[in-house]
Amino acid sequence: MAGKTEIRERVLCSARELFFRYGFNKVTTDEIAAAAGISKRTLYQHFESKERILVEVTEETARETAERAEAVMRDENRDFLGRMMGLMELRSESLSRIGKALVVDVQRHFPGLWRMVEGMRSAFLHSYLEKIVEQGMEEGFFRPDLDPKMLALVYTAAIGDIVNPESLSALPYTAREATEAVTRLIFFGALTDGARKKLAAAGRGVGGRSRTGGKKEGGR
């Protein structure tokens, strides 16, 4: 017989997949229970409402993202560029999993939760980026006259305004392509000549489009 913790984990895992794919409003507790392999009555023994499930899914997803970001920052095998691109890949990967329907539902019906998520995302991104810029200056990637805090603020604002499900739905970019484009447009001018050559060696232009083409392929 499954224990309390296992049942809760199954419910949260099933609900996350359904919410990410279909949004919050179109998913029922019957569907969540069925996907988790339990009865609706059992689901309500562990969660008071579908709204509570959404909150816990959001909190768990945020924790997982923060843990993965910490792992990127602790990886001693990554230099400045490796850490920066690792964080950007993590963000674009996270965004690509979340459907626009869920974003719209949360913004419309749970504005407090949305503000919390955006606040956490901006705070952790800015904090890590400032550290990465400082590392980049120490390693000779960035010009020594830069203000790490200001560069991190500008980049965080640009990423927040452009690389989000709502904006991406109106742009011919995937989350990864948009992230790479913003990264190169903002950081390229701040790099030293040697760092520019190293970035160019990655095989993409300043605008972030791949040399084999940059058209969006299905969804975000």
Image (cartoon, helix red, strand yellow):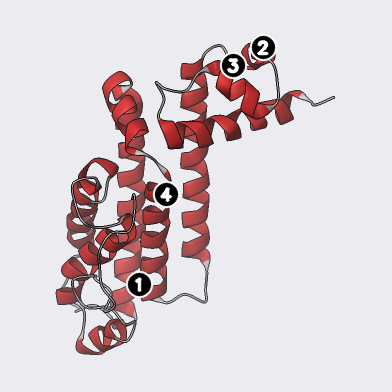
Relative to 152, does residue 116 appear above or below in the rendering? above
Q: Quadrant of residue 134 in the image?
A: bottom left
Relative to 75, does residue 171 appear above or below in the rendering? above
**Mark 2–mark 4 contact, CB under 8 Å?**
no
Give residue 200's mark: none
On the question of residue 116 being in view, the answer is no
User: Where does label 3 land, which residue?
Assistant: 47
Viewer-nearest residue: 201 or 158: 201
Separation of residues labelled 2 and 1 (CA atoms)? 49 Å
Mark 2 vs 1, N-terminal side: 2
Separation of residues labelled 2 and 3 (CA atoms)? 6 Å
> In this rendering, which labeled residue sits more in front, label 4 or label 1?
4
User: Where does label 2 land, which residue?
Assistant: 45
**Mark 2–mark 3 contact, CB under 8 Å?**
no
Q: Position of residue 87 (x, y in %)?
A: 40, 60
Q: Position of residue 101 (x, y in %)?
A: 34, 32
Q: Three-letter amino acid code at disc 4? A: Ser
Q: Quadrant of residue 4 in the image?
A: top right
Q: How many dots with numbers?
A: 4
Q: Residues within 10 Å of mark 3 (few under 14, many from 20)?
A: some
User: Where does label 1 land, which residue?
Assistant: 135
User: Where does label 4 land, which residue?
Assistant: 94
Mark 4 vs 1, N-terminal side: 4
Separation of residues labelled 4 and 1 (CA atoms)? 25 Å
Residue found at x 25% / y 59%: 178
Separation of residues labelled 2 and 4 (CA atoms)? 30 Å
Q: Three-letter amino acid code at disc 3? A: Phe
